[in-house]
Image (cartoon, rainbow, N blue to C red):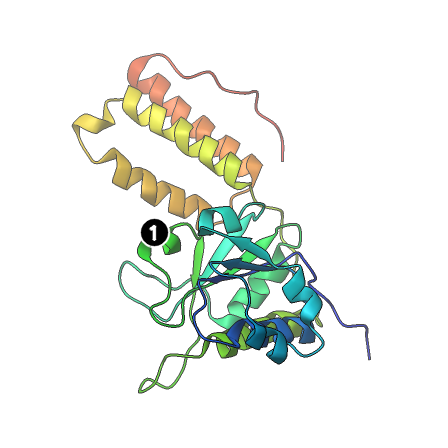
Amino acid sequence: MTEAWLPRNRIPVILVEPVYKGNVGAVTRVMNNFGFTDLRIVGEVPKAEDYYVAVHSQEILDNAGIFDTLEEAVVGCDRLIALSRRRGVKKKVDFLPWNLAEYVHSYPELRIGLVFGRETYGLKDGEADLCHHRAYIPTAPHFPSLNLAQAVSVVLYEVFKAGRGKPSVKNTPASTTELGEASSFLRQVMQNMGYDRVGDTERSLRILDEVLLKAEATPYTLRKVRQIFNRFLVLHTGTGLKFEPDEEA
């Protein structure tokens, strides 16, 4: 048998305001089962019942990060995946558990946070909006809601199992900072072209941001997109924005 792949602290498990006693302990135990070590909790510190359930996994609980907000808890993560059973036109699902696992292993250089909401009503819209992707665990339609620890178990098992194969590693995508800089550049181009007079700049930018994010655009791709938009600006106004020299892939 080949040596098991262990995620350790590359894939933080982030629990937002867990409610029921013992759930954090059960999550900790399954994290230990599959080699995850980075636990982050938004809300209260684990209780005595959590330590009782976290058999041989107390060290993960002791080292868990405790935060007041999700914004604080996700610092250091390159990408965030929200686990939610809510689906709809504005709540599109990017991954099922096995696709999520493939994604994690396709980008080994990224620190990818897995965000699980409250047992009672999940993530608030603002919290879900902080996440770059959304994942869904399919269940029987008559009873779709999973217990928190069960949901975590399903996802961590799929990620662990996928690590035993030979995943296709892809080029490291642009960082969130680079994506933000590209978005700001595109905004300036659109404003200089007078786009505000003919359409909704914010809505269009959200679509462009989503396209670049979902495509996991590389820094090279972002430079090319900025270059293309800058050329449009030159053709439209005669003047472009300051742009860094082009680089080959």
Q: Is residue 247 left or right of residue 69?
A: right
Q: Position of residue 131 (x, y in %)?
A: 44, 53
Tell me the quarter of the image containing the C terminus.
top right
Left or right: residue 144 compared with residue 212: left
Q: Residue furthest left?
A: 197
The residue tagged 1 is 126
The residue most toward the front is 48
> Neighbour class for label 1 at 10 Å: few (<14), some, many (≥20)?
few
Q: Quadrant of the N terminus?
A: bottom right
Q: Nearer the viewer, residue 146 or 103?
A: 146
Occupied quadrant, residue 87? bottom left
Position of residue 156 relative to residue 125, above or below, is: below
Residue at 46% of width from left, 51% of height from top? 68
- Against 19, is 202 above or below? above
Q: Residue at x 37, y 79 (%)?
A: 145
What amino acid is found at the position of numbered circle 1 in the picture? Answer: Gly
Which residue does the image show at 72% across and 76% down from the upper left? Answer: 56
Q: At which x and y percent is residue 27?
A: 57, 73
Which corner quadrant of the image does residue 139 belong to? bottom left
Q: Position of residue 72 (x, y in %)?
A: 50, 46
Which element type, helix, strand or loop, lies under badge 1? helix
- Going by the picture, which residue comes out furthest to the top? 238
Can residue 167 be spotted in the picture? Answer: no
User: How many numbered marks appear?
Assistant: 1
Residue at the (30%, 27%) spot, across then down: 190
Depth check, front residue: 83 or 168: 83
For residue 224, above or below residue 13 = above
| Residue 34 higher or lower than 198, as above or below | below
| Front-lying residue, 199 or 101 | 101
Estimate the x, y position of residue 98 in percent, counting from the top left. 54, 72
State whether residue 231 appears in this view: yes
